[in-house]
Image (tube, rainbow, N blue to C red):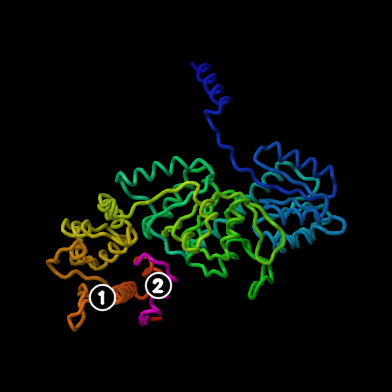
Amino acid sequence: MVKWILSWFLFNLINHSITIPMPKKYQLLIVDDEESITFLLKTEFEDLHDFDVDIAQNGTEAINLVQSKLYDVMLLDIKMPRVGGIEVLKFVKEYSPTTQVIMLTNVVDMKTAFETVKLGAYDFISKPYESEQLRATVRRAIERRQLMIDKEIMKKELIRVSGPSALIGNSSAMREVVVNVKKVAGSDAFVLIQGASGTGKELIAHMLHQESQRKDRPFVAVNCASIPDQLLESELFGHEKGSFTNAYATKQGLVEVANSGTLFLDEVGDISPMTQPKLLRFLETGEFRRVGGTASMKVDVRVVSATNKRLQEEVTGGRFREDLLYRLNIVTIKIPPLKDRKEDIPLLVEYFLTRKSKTRPKRIASAALDLLMRYDWPGNVRELEHVIEGATVLSQGETIEPKDLWVNAALAAGEPPSEPVRTGGGTAESPVNGQGELLSLEQLEKIHIEKVLQHHAFNRVKSAQVLGITPKTLYLKIKKYGIKTES
């Protein structure tokens, strides 16, 4: 039986019907002017099968390689003619800060070796080295580099206002989305996620990453709408020291942080026409240049993008490049709005009640749930999350009642409400002014924006999420309508 299974496995493997994912290899650069040393080190690490090894026989060659390729670890000899190891170390720590440098030194150079650690070297190994010690040091250096990358990713996550942390839903529409995600996750094809604001596009991007062969590598999210146009290129591709005002040091871009992982471009439809050609070149070749730099670098990332805009209409209007759309849109995943999958609302409510309650989760009355089911949720799942968060604060008992909800679901359904339900700062606004005249759409929009801002203590990021627009758009509307905001 065992022989039959083994024969079946080998047959299918040979005929490519079974695919064994190959792990991503670590990039190692060995720099030493002694050819015998570089040959032995290269052979030793290539035998481990999870390293790609390059060698440089002098400092100049090493600097050129660092400018063209991202390395996880560098083994660097201190004593070399012309350009020594210390000069190379200083360049690497400025140009590629996450690359971990291990110095190779003779016993007589121990004082110099200690100085290199102060300059940013991870560690030093004395010659003649012990193979086990060297391999263990390289492994620890790789772990330290990953920690640095994780820290950078965490910083980006902390300054972003994230939505719900889990994909909740058992409707047929959501089951179809999950099936499509699992179909394309195993490939490296670029994916465009389309859906209104608040539907959970980033959660789908996370799922694509977790279901892919890159799941153990970085997932880096970039909100293209929240970064000013003039800074987005620097944020993506990095910049060289002195390339513009306040560029006091070289900065790695997020494409470098995401190397071998997944780069998620949220609200990609808001990228300016000036940055679009540079993004297109990167998507086509994997190559980029830092702002102010001349050397081309190359990374391996899987790009997942998302938008709440109809990009084809943006192309027709001349605001988005057609070739960029085709490059991003290899595979499209569409997320339905919450109004088209209302059967998921009870599950979402239960999830948010558990998540938002600090002690024992509160319950929701059937009448309150009926109101939520009748509402159309223009802000989608994010709006529902905020409504439940507010209700847990407002409700005095253990059960959330209709009066605790900050949304007029009965009015939204076209029925007169049995009692006024709070919407932001008071009762629902009448669409008629003091003279009995119907309000215009702009007047209604101004009133609604004011109420949402008041509800969220004039926090523009949260208010924009509920309104289903970007913070930049909200800022323009505040200026347009002359809305007074608190600092």
Question: Is 446 placed above or below 392 here?
Answer: below
x, y percentage for residue 338?
30, 55
- Circle 2 residues within 10 Å: few <14, some 14–19, many ≥20: some
Residue 38 is marked as: none
Q: Secondary structure at mark 1?
A: loop
What type is the residue that disc 2 sits on? Answer: Leu
Question: Is 163 placed above or below 285 here?
Answer: below
Question: Is 6 on the left or on the right of 66, as rendered?
Answer: left
x, y percentage for residue 299?
63, 51
Question: Is 315 on the left or on the right of 435, as rendered?
Answer: right
Question: Is 373 on the left or on the right of 69, as rendered?
Answer: left
Indicate whether residue 30 is drawn in magenta. no
Identify the residue shown where x is 38% and y is 77%. 478
* Tag in front: 2 or 1: 2
Which residue is disc 2 drawn over? 474
Q: Secondary structure at mark 2?
A: helix
What type is the residue that disc 1 sits on? Answer: Gly
Q: CA distance from mark 2 to mark 1?
A: 19 Å
Give the main secondary structure of the magenta stretch.
helix
x, y percentage for residue 460?
40, 72
* In front of the other: 136 or 413: 413
Identify the residue shown where x is 70% and y is 47%. 28
Identify the residue shown where x is 36% and y is 56%. 199
Identify the residue shown where x is 52% and y is 53%. 219
Which residue is disc 1 drawn over? 425
Highlighted range, magenta = 467-485
